[in-house]
Amino acid sequence: MEKPANSHYPLNPLIRNRWSPRAFEDRPVESWKICSMLEAARWAPSCFNEQPWRFIVGSVDMTPRSHELIGQVLMEGNNWAKKAPVLMLSVAKLHFEYNGKPNRHAQHDVGLAVENLVIQAMDLGLQTHQMAGFHLDKAHDLLAIPRDTYEPMAVIAIGYPGSADLLEGELRNRELSERERQPLQSMVFNERLGVSYPVCFT
């Protein structure tokens, strides 16, 4: 199933066709593809090249216990994701290695790494779905993540896209609904917030 973005300007096809499905095929993801996605994340830019991203990875066929533990931290509304063949938890390292001071860019940089991972997944014929709906304390406890120095950011479901017929009820409706975005005018400004940026809207 494809849901290309209805964009007003040209987009790279990988970006245009990226979306967040809930239906995945019952098919393992090859180990080399998992490593390829993580390698893409490794080469993301970061403040002072700190590389504050960490990933806990679970796949149903190779590391099933890790997959189960990540699934356990999900909130009930995201239980559908347990059927994805790969689950990852992205984690931000909160302090700079070189001086121990707080890194206020850590979460931003983890986002850059995850987007690299997502685009690489698309190039490999996979899709991803990122979720903020997980229990933070449970993630710290079950996955042994130190509270003072690391922050769990998102659970990422990864797999080969499946048919919406694999889903029921509201999940199926959401799978089939059109993708939407706010217009550029609502997020791009000139000189200060609230003043329209004229270049893209003339």
Image (spheres, grey):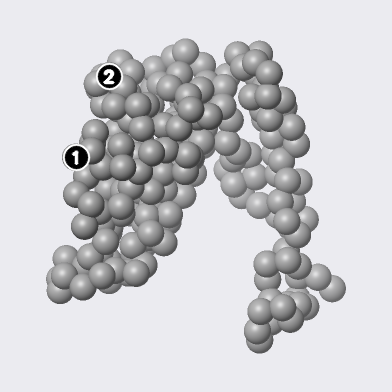
Label 2 – label 1 distance at C-alpha: 17 Å
Locate residue 7, reporting x and y percent.
74, 51
- Please state the horizontal and vertical placement of residue 49, each as a whole percent of the image: 27, 66
| Position of the N terminus by quadrant | top right
Tag 2: amino acid:
Pro
Q: Residue 132 vs residue 152: left or right?
A: right
The answer to whether residue 134 is above or below residue 78 is: below
Q: Which mark is residue 197?
A: none
Q: Are marks 2 and 1 in contact (CB under 8 Å)?
A: no
Residue lying furthest right = 202
Q: Which residue is label 1 attached to?
A: 144
Q: Amino acid at mark 1?
A: Ala
Could you tell me which secondary element the residue under label 2 belongs to?
helix
User: Can you say which quadrant of the picture contains the C terminus?
Assistant: bottom right
> Horizontal and vertical percent for residue 141?
23, 38
Query: Which of 39 and 86 lies nearest the eye of the viewer?
Result: 86
Q: Is residue 40 visible?
A: no
Image: 191 above or below 84? below
Instruction: Give the side of residue 77 with respect to residue 40, left or right.
Output: right
Crowding around mark 2 (Cα neighbors within 10 Å: few <14, some 14 to 19, many 20+) is: some
- Which of 193/42 is in front? 193
Residue, disc 2: 64
Residue 144, by quadrant, is top left
Residue at point 21% right, 73% down? Answer: 101
Of mark 2 and mark 1, the one earlier in the sequence is 2
Residue located at (60% from left, 38% from top): 19
Count every numbered label the image shows and give the total: 2
Q: Is residue 139 left or right of residue 159?
A: left
Q: Please tell me whether residue 160 is drawn above or below residue 189 in the rendered image.
A: above
